[in-house]
Image (tube, rainbow, N blue to C red):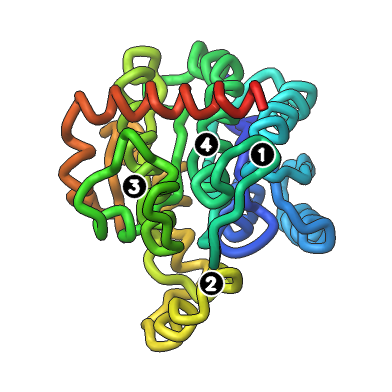
Amino acid sequence: MADEAMRVAVVTGASSGIGRELAKALAGQGWRVIGTGRNPARIADAEAEIRSVSTSGQVEMLRADLSLMASARETADRIGALTDRIDLLVNNAGGMASEMVMTQEGLEANFAGNHLGPFVLTNALLPLLRAAAKDREPGAVRILNTASDASEMVPAIDLDDMQSLERFSPGLAYCTGKLANVLFARALATRLGHEGIAAHAVHPGAVDSNFFSYAPKDTQERALGLDKATEAEGADTLIWLATAYEGWRTNGGYWFRRELRAPNPVVDDPAVVNRFWIESERLVETASRA
């Protein structure tokens, strides 16, 4: 088995919120942490804080905008230049937009940032995950997706219009993106489980962070009344799944407060999961031609 002190974690959205808390926890346990963020000032501040608690001294922060597929691919290339293995990938970056914005690649920015960018990044990093899995126990290499109970608030996912372009609203776009996180974890578990790689989705609960900063005004107002967890509390299940035996004892789960939670029923439909993957590939390919 590989030297446990040299486990490598990639955490997107590590410059703030629960991603930052997760990165700090892993760094404190001796992991090498490679994080991403979008804001240069927050990236610099996070890198200094994560490095200050690191017991390995190996912390790198990269600037990345995962709403752009080109940036996701470039980020994968930059990570590949830093390491030849990844023991943990946490697709944590995401957010809620206040309006529809189309990217220069022709994709709806919120769905692209919440799902399609992580989809591209994960697939590009699979060789490094597989390299780590070769000398680890089955399930020790893991992919975690930060989702939300918003994934449960829509009856289904429109596989013909996953970006919700025909009936866009910020709420629908966010709920669909979070359902995509759960579907993606299930699809990865199905596709990679036989290779010893586990994948899970996590609902962290409402967290007192800057998450709602870009949400519509009415959402920000509703959020004021929520009983919010601290950032450390929100990160707890992610940290636990990343490091505890439960993360490899099961596969493809949807978790809340260290307990399995029933996902949106469509997640349990293999036909939906398979079509979801195909449509994700189609949208990414469309963007590559833009």
Q: Secondary structure at mark 3?
A: helix
CB atoms of marks 2 and 3 within 8 Å? no
Which residue is outermost to the front? 166
Q: Which mark is residue 116?
A: 4
Residue lying at 65% horizontally and 44% vertically, measured from the top left:
103
Task: Compute the Cα span from label 1 to label 3.
Answer: 20 Å
Q: Is residue 107 visible?
A: yes
Q: Which residue is mark 3?
A: 179
Q: Between disc 1 and disc 3, whose residue precedes?
A: 1
Residue type at tag 2: Phe
Q: Between disc 2 and disc 3, whose residue precedes?
A: 3
* 83 vs 238: above or below: above
Task: Compute the Cα span from label 2 to label 4.
Answer: 21 Å
Q: Between disc 4 and disc 3, whose residue precedes?
A: 4
Between residue 91 and residue 247, name the one nearer to us: 91
Residue density around tag 1, few if under 14, some if 14–19, many if 20 or more, within 10 Å: many
Residue type at tag 1: Leu
Give the mark toward the camera: 2 or 1: 1
Residue lying at 40% horizontally and 83% vertically, measured from the top left:
222
Q: Which residue is mark 1?
A: 68
Residue density around tag 2, few if under 14, some if 14–19, many if 20 or more, within 10 Å: many
Residue type at tag 4: Leu
Between residue 173 and residue 234, name the one nearer to us: 173
Q: Which mark is residue 281?
A: none
Q: Which mark is residue 212?
A: 2
* 19 vs 232: above or below: above
Q: Position of residue 80 (x, y in %)?
A: 72, 22
Quick check: 188 left or right of 111?
A: left
Task: Compute the Cα span from label 2 to label 1.
Answer: 21 Å
Residue lying at 38% horizontally and 42% vertically, measured from the top left:
180
Give the mark toward the camera: 1 or 3: 1
